[in-house]
Image: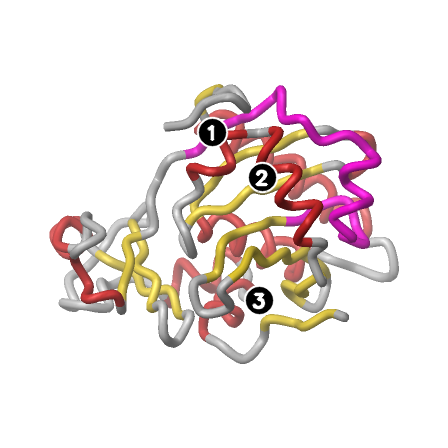
Amino acid sequence: MTQTLASSRLGRLAQRSATDREAALERCELCGEPIPREHRHLLDLVGRELMCACRACSLLFDSHAAGAGHYRLVPDRRLRIADLDLDDAAWEELRVPVDMAFFFHSSPAGRVQAFYPGPMGATESLLGLEAWADLEAANPVLQTLEPDVEALLVNRARGARQQWIVPIDECYALVGLIRSHWRGLTGGKEVWVEIARFYEELDRRSRPASRRDTR
């Protein structure tokens, strides 16, 4: 069973090209102040929408107590977890049909959800919850994921074995990139060049972490 994220603004953000997003998101959506290209986001937990925020407004929500349970600041930590205990058998148990996916704790759904990027946007995969529990037990760092706003991003495409903990907006940037560059049945050469560039930049911005880390 799958479900495509297309109805919310969060989904629509993922479906735009990077250029379109940069042109459209030039001001803080809370106070209207101009914002630079690199800026923080708030997640509307009710509508599942991302909102661009200036530095001043993002500081107001830099606390779990802020936002009255309605808004949450998307964090900016990026961890590269080279030693994640996730072999081919464990990956199959997660029941993800492709080799790239992201996983996050959804407060509205009350469970972990898995989505994978493709030419139509982000599609939900029916996650094997017992398999996720086993994965989390083997990798304590996954227990540090902040609900709704942080995700485990996995890249196993073309023989890769890469895993990161990332802000949720990074996942949707990847979805938007794939959607905008995909051509034909297999994506074409251009999309794979862009995907490789995305992961290289993510690696550059990430710091190494161990699967055993608990903070």
Residue matched to label 3: 15
Residue, far right:
185
Q: Dot 2, crowdedness within 10 Å: few (<14), some or many (≥20)? A: some
Q: Measured from the top left, where is residue 124 in percent x and y?
A: 66, 64
Q: Which residues are magenta?
A: 78-101
Q: Residue at x 45, y 53 (%)?
A: 169
Between discs 3 and 1, the one toward the N terminus: 3
The residue tagged with tag 2: helix, strand or loop? helix
Instruction: Judge by depth and name the residue closer to the eye, 126 or 54.
Output: 126
Q: Measured from the top left, where is residue 121 in percent x and y?
A: 65, 65
Q: Residue at x 39, y 76 (%)?
A: 47
* Numbered mark located on residue 198 in the image: 2
The residue tagged with tag 1: helix, strand or loop? strand
Q: Amino acid at mark 2?
A: Phe
Q: Amino acid at mark 3?
A: Gln
Viewer-nearest of labels 1 and 2? 1
Instruction: Judge by depth and name the residue closer to the eye, 130 or 37.
Output: 130
Residue matched to label 1: 79
Q: Measured from the top left, where is residue 164 in percent x and y?
A: 55, 34
| Lateral position of residue 180 relative to residue 146, left or right | right
Instruction: Judge by depth and name the residue closer to the eye, 122 or 113.
Output: 113
Q: Amino acid at mark 1?
A: Leu
